[in-house]
Amino acid sequence: MAEINLIIGLLGMLLILIAFLLDEFSKSIHHQSWQFNVLNIFGSLLLTYYAYTLNSIPFMILNGVWFVAAIVKLFFISK
């Protein structure tokens, strides 16, 4: 089970890093795009779960807030 949790954590980290790198170096995906925010939503959700499995409260709070912020941002972008 620990290996699966690690894979979930690595996948979440990878999604957030991809979103960040695309925002920095891509002309089509930026912090106002739905693609960027979807990557952040799934990445932060996976990292929140991973933090839960580690019982890391600060990491859960950080990624939980990241998740909520990305959801709210996607809502405003879609309007």
Image (spheres, helix red, strand yellow):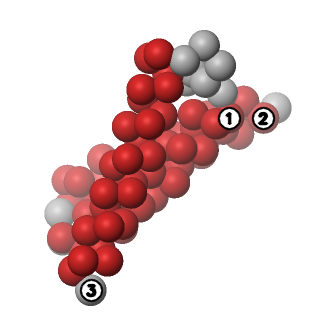
Q: How far apart, in angstroms, are the residues tagged by discs 3 and 2?
A: 37 Å
Q: How far apart, in angstroms, are the residues tagged by discs 3 and 1?
A: 33 Å
Q: Quick one: quadrant of the N terminus?
A: bottom left
Q: Which disc number belongs to residue 1?
A: 3
Q: Is residue 5 left or right of residue 43?
A: left
Q: Which disc number belongs to residue 14?
A: none
Q: Amino acid at mark 3?
A: Met
Q: Secondary structure at mark 2?
A: helix
Residue designated by label 2 = 78
Q: Position of residue 19 (x, y in %)?
A: 48, 34
Q: Is residue 9 left or right of residue 20?
A: left
Q: Are the residues at dot 3 and dot 1 in contact (C-beta closer than 8 Å)?
A: no
Q: Are the residues at dot 1 and dot 2 in contact (C-beta closer than 8 Å)?
A: yes
Q: Amino acid at mark 1?
A: Trp
Front position in the image: 76 or 47: 47
Residue 62 visible to the viewer: yes
Residue designated by label 1 = 34
Q: Secondary structure at mark 1?
A: helix
Q: Amino acid at mark 2?
A: Ser
Residue 66 visible to the viewer: no
